[in-house]
Amino acid sequence: MDLIIFLVVAAISFAGSIHIGAVNLAVVQATLNRNISAGILVAFGGSIPEFIYSFIALKGVFFLKDNQFLLSWLNLLIIPFFLLMGVVYLFQKESANADKIPLMGRNKLNFLKGFSLGMLNPQLLPFWFFILVFLGKYFSINDLSAKYAFVLGTGIGAFAILALFAYLANQYKSYINQLLRNLSVNRLMGYLFISLALMQIIKVFA
């Protein structure tokens, strides 16, 4: 039963991370600008928050009800963060400066980029909260092993789709770069992050 819970949750996490978001955009950008290893590190960092938020969701079905301020804070904080990321990418050179950073430092930056973008995703906590409530109708997620299966499934499913983004970006790097020959990857990322910020503003204040 625990294996079934793990597989179902992993599949939900995989499918739920397919849509365009900050983390998978960062994975693609790191892969195109650097290599697949950089993209995988961003993917790894971006999947860690799935473990954290799914664990928090397990703490109790009333968590969100008692902590609405947390979601409101995240929804507001993500706006200036996306705007800042957009401005940074718009004025950042492709990879010349990155080559001057030691490999260990680049690895940490890639991991932290994915982790910070994932932690600032205001949708993760309510998503896993409601998925947990939904699955509770079909599975008993009360004992420790079932909870471990649930939490592991969230992070591993997310990492699988993010790693797939890195693989596809690396596999078709030359084709993508050709499509973007008149627009740098960083500039495109800048526009996308600013667009995400504008969408978040509409979502929060509309």
Image: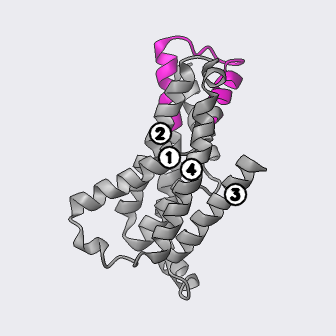
Residue of label 3: 199
Q: Earlier in the sequence, mark 1 or mark 4?
A: 4
Question: Is the residue under label 4 in contact with that under label 1 (CB below 8 Å)?
Answer: no
- Label 1, on which residue? 118
Residue visible at 53% across and 35% down in the picture: 154
Q: Secondary structure at mark 4?
A: helix
Check disc 3: other Cα within 10 Å, few if <14, some if 14-19, many if 20+.
Answer: few
In terms of image quadrants, where is residue 132? top right
Q: Residues within 10 Å of mark 2 (few under 14, many from 20)?
A: many
Q: Nearer the viewer, mark 4 or mark 2?
A: 4
Name the N-terminal-most of marks 3 and 4: 4
Task: Give the percent coordinates (x, y) of residue 140.
Answer: 62, 14
Label 1 neighbour load within 10 Å: few <14, some 14-19, many 20+:
many
Q: Main secondary structure of the magenta part?
A: helix
Does the CB distance between marks 3 and 2 fall below 8 Å? no
Who comes first in sequence, dot 4 or dot 2? 2
Residues marked 2 and 1 touching at CB (< 8 Å): yes
Secondary structure beneath dot 2 equals helix
Q: Earlier in the sequence, mark 1 or mark 3?
A: 1
Examine the structure image and report whether residue 134 is included in the region drawn in magenta: yes
As measured in the structure, the alpha-carbon distance from the residue carrying label 4 to the one carrying label 2 is 15 Å
Cα distance in 3D space between marks 3 and 4: 11 Å
Identify the residue under disc 2. 49
Three-letter amino acid code of the residue under disc 2: Pro
Label 4, residues with CA under 10 Å away: few <14, some 14-19, many ≥20:
many
Point out the residue furthest to the right here: 206
Give the vertical position of 183 relative to 197 (above or below). below
